[in-house]
Image (cartoon, rainbow, N blue to C red):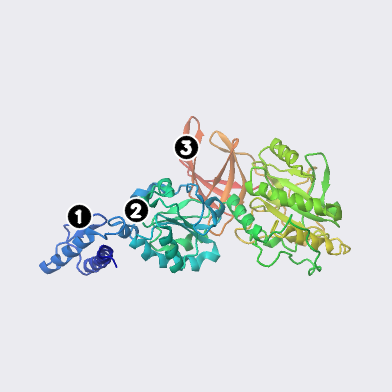
Amino acid sequence: MHPFRFCKNLCQRLAVAARRAMDLAVSKFPPAPRRLQATGTSLTAPIVSLRGSQTLCLLTLALAVSLGPVGCQRGEQEELRTKSDERYRHWIGKPSPPLKFNALDGREVDLEQLRGKVVLLDFWATWCPPCMEELPHVRDAYERFQKQGFEVVGISFDMDKQQLEEVVKHERLAWPQYFDGLGRDAAPGKAFGIQHWPSMWLLDRNGVIRYISAGQRLDRKIASLLREEANPLIRAKAVADAKAALDKSGEEPAKPAAAPVARGPISPPGAPQDPAYLHWLGKPFPPLKFKAIDGREVDTDKLRGRVLLIDFWATWCPPCMAELPKVKAAYTRYHSQGFDIIGVSADENLADLERVVRQKELAWPQLFEGRSGPVPNLRRYGVQHFPSMWLVDRQGIIRDVTGTVALDDKVARLLAESGSAAPVAAQPPKANPPAGAELLARPAPAPNGKTPAVPDASSSPPTPAPRPPDTKLGDNSISLKNITIGAKRSTALLQIGTSTYTISPGMEIVFPSGGVNRKARCTEIDRGTVVLAIEGTAEPLRLLLP
């Protein structure tokens, strides 16, 4: 080994050992009341009143630590492994800058395409001893969590491509590596403001920077982020990306397969399952009757004997727009064989929906549900995110909730099934679907004001409570639109005046009241109620879900 590199490694190891010895010694000799602070490059160490030999020992160790490891940047590794680096603290909670490149092995990498996964950005170099020491830990974490939705993106600050390739091969680094040959001036370093190596940042499923000192307790941080869910749009995009690997729609017509077991799910092995809708599988699709935006009268009960794709979507949703070509191809291929599509749009306004339908030449009927209004059907079916696509067989039974995964094959299989069985009366799902999978779906009143009849009264849900009178919050009316109960966090959608707000327990709302601003704090969200503590008022405000 080169003498200079040997010295750097020796100093680095000495500093780590010194810090551990310092912590051990201080724990054994409690400090006196008087306390002085001596600061080094990466450590604020207490100098305590001790006996002579003890003081000399601690001062010697403190001096070694203050010198720090002579690595890539003096003292930086120890600082990263003990506390968040103050220079990067302003990045926490912000979306990651875009990063798109062709990796060292030719792979195309785009952070935008990794939304829905937890991502470790590893800023490193082969000439950096602390970086090399971290590689086994990163590799272990990658092998442990990769199948659960964890990815690593290496960003190399090397100038020697051959050296980087040799290290990647020798260390068995399976993740992509950025390399532009500019060394310390590599482009991502400027974009992210990297000042020392290694720097490891953890991004959550939404692409937000959550940790800028990821090397400390890396496994625990990854596991914590993996337990979190992405927001609905990001989660939908992640599901859509996972579908692409299995989906063969639009390439060639699928060969009809043998009919599956009656009313069983038909998704292929390995297809990503959406837990929000699994409780619907095998249940009758509740009837949907409406007048489409082009004037057509649609009644799903009259479509028995045909295979239906119910597409909950919106033009403002990029994954929804990305799925349209596959959906349109399936409609063109199978419509004459007994396949229909019904679009349920959550668009902000009708004009946007009409424009996209016209531009994309979508021939199937569209129900304009809206996004911020009552949205009775979105609540009725418990729609959690967009796009959500359900396949309904000839008997009106929900058979698939995985969207366009192998769509051609699934439609062909359902078309091959016999539709001669006696019709099954549509019923809503049983109450209490799994936690995190409900938006409190309830039957919506029909346009004539009457509640749709349900043949089997024993399986129908309780009659919804009457709509509560208008409630005021300060100068504006307030109403509860929907509730999402999650395993980790529950949220509620409130409409205050003409605006809508998403809140969760602990969040505060500032509202005008008589010319002054007051605060309301959300204290509780359950399956049908939101409780707000109003500033200056002893009695809380309870909002009921209509």
Percent across and percent down for residue 387 are 67, 51
Q: Residue at x 51, y 66 (%)?
A: 145
Say which of marks 2 and 3 sits in front: 2
Q: Looking at the rendered structure, which numbered label has been put on residue 228?
A: none
Q: Are marks 3 and 1 in contact (CB under 8 Å)?
A: no
Q: Looking at the rendered structure, which numbered label has been put on residue 518?
A: 3
Q: Tell me the kind of residue under disc 2.
A: His
Is tag 3's residue or tag 1's residue first in the polypeptide sequence?
A: 1
Circle 2 crowding by C-alpha within 10 Å: few under 14, some 14–19, many from 20:
some
Is tag 2's residue or tag 1's residue first in the polypeptide sequence?
A: 1
Q: Looking at the rendered structure, which numbered label has been put on residue 196?
A: 2
Q: Quadrant of residue 202?
A: bottom left
Q: Tell me the kind of residue under disc 3.
A: Arg
Q: Is residue 24 left or right of residue 397?
A: left
Say which of marks 2 and 1 sits in front: 2
Name the residue beneath numbered marker 1: 37
Under tag 3, what secondary structure? strand
Q: Nearer the viewer, residue 382 or 163?
A: 163
Is tag 2's residue or tag 3's residue first in the polypeptide sequence?
A: 2
Q: Is residue 166 left or right of residue 4?
A: right
Real-space CA distance between mark 2 and mark 3, rounded to the nearest whole angstrom: 46 Å
Q: Nearer the viewer, residue 526 or 372?
A: 372
Q: Tell me the kind of residue under disc 1.
A: Gln
